């Protein structure tokens, strides 16, 4: 991938962060005397020089709680050996290496090793099928793939002929065993053990480093590229939001294919020298409470879906596991309703912070910071160094809205170190698509008089009902106050008269029975709370809302359901977690 044209300065662009602070951080993270700036080296080798080699860098818990630890010294050594392997295989700086692994130590070795070799780290979701994996490998023009042996056999082997750029495949036996690779693959562990460690390439801050495909909930996936300087934003948000220090144990529950894992499951905690905890299991309240307590997790980053799943199991379970170690918990990916914030705070006994950002922004940009007064239900305020605005598109130009509480689109100025360098297309970086110098997020928000941002909806999810623009999140947030509802998704259903009307889909809390009586009660509650114009006209009970792997409600699936015949979808039996508590 061609490097972005920009200069070597870390804080280039319109937004003026406190330059001296960035310069100090840049110096702290620099591992090369000649100014080379490499995420892989800064997250591992740098800590050896500081005498931290024996400290646990990563603890991975397997499905049956088997534990695999890797120290900073081992992480530095193995990632440098992998860098040597990749360079030996002909990897050129800027080439993409795709990684398709679950949460195992090799995932961390791969991320840092690829970056040390000057490559671009491109993690993929292991739960994707062969089609999405093939299309992303093709779009990224990946030269090398590091993949779990079973995933390769099931999801990649049949696509090899359609991927002419993919020169090498390195197979990982994820339970730590060596694999016997087929003829057109290599064994990761054998190669890494045989190699001598290579020094990290002296990449520049603006050299491409990370490539993530956005979740694709609204269309074709877009490949978003960040450069090595992104780690400045990861380090600063790791320290200032999560308070990360070397004796912290940080657990980020994000899937390895989601940028949230790269930023906060890998780079931020390792740049801060903390211990990363990674758990193989998907959302599992009882197991997760156990991990928070037994592993003495100090800071926890999760999603609204996870916290709402835990709410379904009740506060008593949470209290029975209450951990004294936890200092802070936070959530990202979706709107976090007020009820979930308050429940999280009470159940976990620590501040529970909402944070907002996007793949394109690369790290937390808006948050309810621990040092400020929280406003539950809001996303919080912009972090220092971020230049944000609420804007309205007026033809080809943008109008910045200064008046508080007016809904508009959230826009961010480039210049924040982890902002995208661009989108990837045919192996080269395309522009980041700015409008009047702003990056438009596609999220509708309002900012109150004190600077707190409130999420209204995705611009393309707004429900246009008569003369009204209805934000789905406002309706969902209010419906969630009804004790029967565990999760709610609201979408627009085409209507001849009004253009669209709001329709709700909901899953139920334990102890509630789907049926006409409950439906009538909830709809009446909605009309009373929201007024008849905004209240959903229909309510469908479903066991689980359709979600992306990152836990976002798939509104286009709900929209498709909304136009199906109601008998096809309603009512359905309740899902099993409801039986617990
Ligand atoms: C990190 C990540 C970005 C989109 C974003 C917005 C939604 C994320 C949110 C939130 C409301 C929050 N989103 N955090 N909505 N409140 N705290 O999620 O990146 O996968 O690219 O998604 O997710 O709609 O625009 P990504």
Image (cartoon, rainbow, N blue to C red):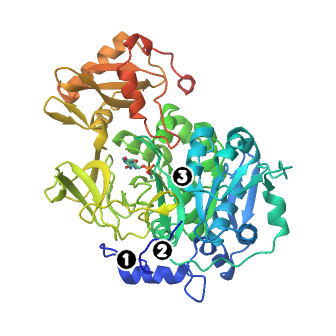
Please report the residue visible at 44 percent of the width from the left and 13 percent of the height from the top. Answer: 568
Residue at the disc numbered 2:
206
Classify residue 462 by image quadrant.
Answer: top left
Classify residue 195 by image quadrant.
Answer: bottom right
Give residue 11's position: percent from left, percent from top: 39, 76
Give residue 341's position: percent from left, percent from top: 39, 45
Looking at the image, is mark 2 or mark 1 earlier in the sequence?
1
Question: Label 2 neighbourhood size at 10 Å, few (<14), some (14-19), many (20+)?
Answer: many
The Cα atoms of the two marked residues, 2 and 3, are separated by 22 Å
Q: Is residue 256 visible?
A: no
Secondary structure at badge 2 equals: loop
Using residue 233 as the reference point, say whether residue 129 is left or right of it. Answer: right
Image quarter hosting the C terminus: top right
Q: Do the residues labelled 2 and 1 touch (CB within 8 Å)?
A: yes
- Labels in figure, total: 3
Residue 165 in the image: above or below residue 578: below
Question: Label 3 neighbourhood size at 10 Å, few (<14), some (14-19), many (20+)?
Answer: some
Residue at the disc numbered 3:
139
Of residue 377 and residue 490, the one placed in the foreground of this image is: 490
């Amino acid at each position: 991938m061609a490097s972005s044209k920009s200069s070597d300065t870390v804080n280039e662009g319109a937004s003026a962060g406190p330059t001296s602070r960035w310069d100090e951080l840049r110096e702290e993270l620099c591992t090369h005397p000649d100014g080379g700036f490499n995420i892989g080296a800064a997250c591992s080798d740098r800590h050896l020089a500081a005498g931290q080699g024996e400290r646990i860098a990563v603890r991975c818990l397997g499905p049956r709680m088997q534990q695999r630890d890797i120290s900073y010294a081992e992480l530095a050594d193995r990632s440098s050996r992998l860098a040597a392997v990749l360079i030996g295989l002909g990897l050129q700086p800027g080439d993409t290496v795709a990684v398709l692994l679950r949460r195992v130590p090799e995932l961390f070795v791969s991320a840092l090793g690829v970056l040390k070799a000057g490559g671009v780290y491109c993690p993929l979701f292991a739960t994707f099928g062969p089609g999405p994996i093939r299309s992303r490998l093709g779009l990224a023009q990946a030269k090398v793939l590091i993949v779990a042996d079973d995933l390769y056999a099931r999801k990649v082997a049949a696509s090899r002929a359609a991927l002419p750029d993919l020169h090498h495949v390195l197979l990982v036996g994820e339970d730590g065993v060596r694999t016997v690779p087929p003829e057109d693959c290599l064994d990761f562990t054998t190669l890494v053990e045989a190699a001598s460690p290579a020094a990290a390439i002296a990449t520049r801050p603006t050299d491409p480093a990370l490539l993530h495909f956005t979740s694709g909930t609204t269309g074709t996936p877009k490949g978003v590229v960040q450069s090595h300087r992104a780690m400045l934003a990861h380090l600063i948000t790791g320290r200032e939001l999560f308070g990360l220090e070397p004796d912290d144990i940080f657990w980020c529950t994000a899937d390895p294919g989601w940028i949230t894992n790269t930023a906060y499951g890998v780079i931020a905690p390792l740049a801060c020298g903390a211990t990363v905890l990674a758990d193989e299991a998907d959302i599992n309240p009882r197991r997760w409470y156990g991990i928070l307590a037994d592993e003495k997790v100090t800071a926890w980053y999760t999603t609204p879906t996870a916290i709402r799943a835990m709410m379904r199991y009740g506060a008593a379970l949470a209290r029975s596991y209450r951990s004294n170690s936890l200092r802070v918990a936070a959530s990202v990916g979706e709107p976090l309703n007020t009820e979930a914030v308050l429940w999280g705070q009470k159940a976990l006994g620590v501040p529970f912070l909402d944070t907002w950002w996007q793949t394109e922004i690369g790290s937390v940009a808006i948050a309810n910071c621990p040092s400020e007064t929280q406003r539950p239900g809001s996303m919080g305020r912009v972090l220092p160094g971020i230049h944000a605005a609420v804007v309205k598109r007026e033809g080809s130009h943008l109008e910045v809205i200064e008046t508080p509480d007016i809904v508009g689109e959230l826009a961010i100025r480039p210049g924040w170190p982890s902002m995208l360098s661009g989108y990837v297309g045919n192996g080269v970086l395309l522009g980041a698509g700015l409008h009047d110098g702003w990056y438009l997020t596609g999220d509708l928000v309002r900012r109150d008089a004190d600077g707190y941002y409130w999420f209204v909806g995705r611009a393309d999810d707004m429900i246009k009902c008569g003369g009204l623009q209805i934000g789905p999140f406002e309706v969902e947030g209010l419906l969630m106050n009804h004790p029967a509802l565990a999760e709610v998704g609201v979408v627009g259903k085409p209507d001849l008269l009004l253009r669209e009307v709001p329709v709700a889909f909901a899953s139920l809390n334990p102890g509630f029975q789907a049926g006409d009586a409950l439906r009538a009660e909830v709809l009446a509650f909605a009309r009373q709370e929201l007024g008849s114009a905004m209240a959903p006209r229909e309510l469908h009970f479903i066991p689980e809302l359709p979600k992306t792997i990152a836990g976002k409600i798939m509104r286009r699936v709900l929209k498709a359901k909304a136009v199906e015949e109601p008998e096809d979808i309603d009512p359905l039996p309740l899902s099993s977690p409801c039986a617990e508590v």
